[in-house]
Amino acid sequence: MIECAGCENISFLQLYGDNFMMREGRDGEVEYYEDEKIYPPYLEYGEELNRISQVPENIRSIYKETINAMKVQSLLLTAAGFRAVIEAICNHLKIKRANLADGINLLHSNGYLSKSESRRLHSVRFLGNNALHEIETPKVEQLVILLNIVNHLLSNLFINDKMIKGKLDIPLDNYEDFTNVIRRSVKREMIGKEIDLDGLLGKVRRLMSTKDYKSFRAAFVNEVKTGNFDFIALIDENNARFEVLKEEKMNTTFDL
């Protein structure tokens, strides 16, 4: 039994040697050596992504299998696995493409990736293609770079926003979140009173771009006018003034 001097993790070390296990040493003389195996397997280089539980299940499953392959030095499978993670991300985000190259470009054009991030993902694709089609075994240091690229991508797409939600202000650029803010802002003491849209939004208004605000305001006024919301009634369409009819019970949470 061994203990890591850094993280204090407990592992099992197996050493095996026999009279036939010989090799040439640095000084040219023959020396005996031992095979060393550590259980459970671990990443000798690089780090597994923290908070992986927040990544969608289908992507998380492929990522974990890829990490397990990397732990046991299955280098071809690791390169193919990282490529499969990118495919799974495209599927999850409903990116329709003829091939993975198009998918990566569409991730950029649809706003999920910066140009530089898109270029790095093509590196993942190239190495995965070489492993799958050319049976070209990648180097460990190449796979460590891919691991860092994939970790960064998964963090940006699925983890970072969840970490800051409720702790830091983020842009309000989604209409569903916009209506949820309004629902949550309605209090019992407002029933029967008139209030304008800015009064309902409060400080959240500053988290919206002018373009989004105008678009969401027009959509919300129209939905109230057509009776899609039963907790509020439209009083003045031009000035977006409403009468609160009842307190809205929210089953979902939205934090800013």
Image (cartoon, helix red, strand yellow):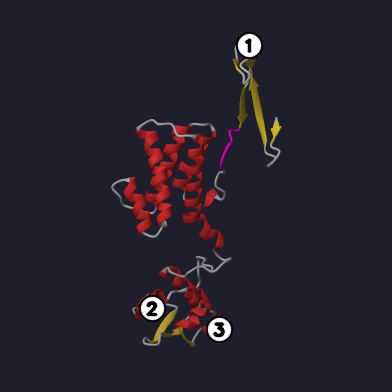
Q: Which sits in the foreground, 167 or 121?
A: 121
> How far across and down, in percent of the image, does residue 191 sit?
51, 84
> How far across and down, in percent of the image, does residue 186 sit?
51, 78
Q: Is residue 209 left or right of residue 10?
A: left
Residue at the spot of label 1: 19
User: Which callout, 3 or 1, points at the residue further toward the start of the chain?
Assistant: 1
Are the residues tagged 2 and 1 within 8 Å (C-beta)?
no
How much space separates mark 3 and mark 1, taking CA atoms? Answer: 87 Å
Q: Which sits in the foreground, 247 or 164?
A: 164
Q: Which residues are magenta?
A: 40-46
> How far across and down, in percent of the image, does residue 182 sit?
47, 76
Label 1 sits on what residue type?
Answer: Asn
How much space separates mark 2 and mark 1, taking CA atoms? Answer: 81 Å
How much space separates mark 3 and mark 2, taking CA atoms? Answer: 28 Å
Q: Is residue 142 left or right of residue 29?
A: left
- On whether residue 93 falls in the magenta region, the answer is no
Residue at the spot of label 3: 189
User: As displayed, is residue 143 above or below residue 112?
Assistant: above
**Which disc number belongs to residue 214?**
2
Label 2 sits on what residue type?
Answer: Lys
